[in-house]
Amino acid sequence: MKRENLAGGKAWRAEFGRGVVLRIVLCGALGLAVHALNAQEKGGINVSVQGKDGSDAGLIISAEATAKEVGLPMYPGARPHKDDAKDSPAAKLGLWGSSFGFKLVVLKLESNDSPEKIAAFYQKALAKYGTVLNCSNASWAQEDKSKNSAANRLTCEDDRPEPGGMMLKSGTKERQRIVGITPNGQGSLFQLVYVETRGEKKPA
């Protein structure tokens, strides 16, 4: 499967389908940010301002991130994965204001272990955040559509892995953690993703 670096967007489309992650992430903007950071070699962008009313707004863009920031453990023996010399194996993007907020943390990793073994490891790790959705399973996708659920209940929606891949999700729509895994020869490529969104609260 042809892959592009984090900036390209197509690789993430291949890994995570056309669902909520792609709608939220805005890969183009993230890609430009990561390219800029690669050009700077080190450092990032971290800007915060405070309004006269006490509200604050800010922007964080970094090509460095940790599994701790995703909220998941590092898989034993996993290594950072780069598609090419200019690619970054990690990215962090945050944008917030008085009435909204967005945070994205991504780690791209590789392992000599099979997708099934990695999935079993993260199935347990994701369980601390609630029910673990296996979006690789077509029957779960059907269950998503058949249930009337709370507005904040996490679903697979249109997120699907590529054929042969696996995708697990847990959390809520506002705070979700995603693990996407694809075969890579005798081993696997996988991504750990944390997405947090905060919109303006409607008056009661």
Image (spheres, rainbow, N blue to C red):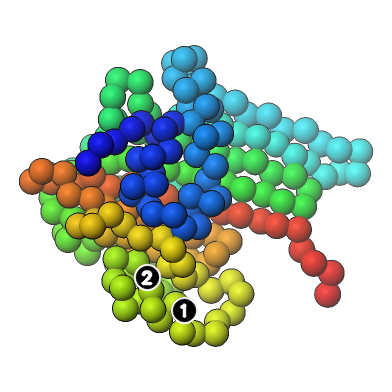
Eyeballing the image, is 76 above or below 199? above
Work out which residue is located at the far left of the displayed protein and give it.
186
Residue where numbered disc 2 is placed: 133
Picture residue at 65% right of the left edge, 41% below the top: 95
What is the secondary structure assignment of the residue under circle 1?
helix
Q: CA distance from mark 1 to mark 2?
A: 14 Å
Q: Mark 1 Cα within 10 Å, few/some/many (few <14, many 20+)?
A: few
Picture residue at 10% right of the left edge, 43% below the top: 185
In this rendered view, identify the residue nearer to me: 188 or 77. Answer: 188
Sequence order check, earlier mark of 1 and 2: 2
The answer to whether any part of residue 142 appears in the image is yes
Measured as percent of width and height from the top left, residue 3 is found at 29, 36
Work out which residue is located at the far right of the displayed protein and give it.
52
Measured as percent of width and height from the top left, residue 127 is found at 37, 69
Three-letter amino acid code at the position of disc 1? Lys
Quadrant position of residue 86: top left
Q: Nearer the viewer, mark 1 or mark 2?
A: 1
Picture residue at 60% right of the left edge, 34% below the top: 60
Q: Mark 2 Cα within 10 Å, few/some/many (few <14, many 20+)?
A: many
In the image: residue 27, left or right of residue 202: left
Picture residue at 70% right of the left edge, 57% below the top: 199
Eyeballing the image, is 78 above or below 32? below
Three-letter amino acid code at the position of disc 2? Leu
What is the secondary structure assignment of the residue under circle 2?
strand
Q: Considering the image in quadrants, where does the C terminus appear?
A: bottom right
Residue where numbered disc 1 is placed: 145
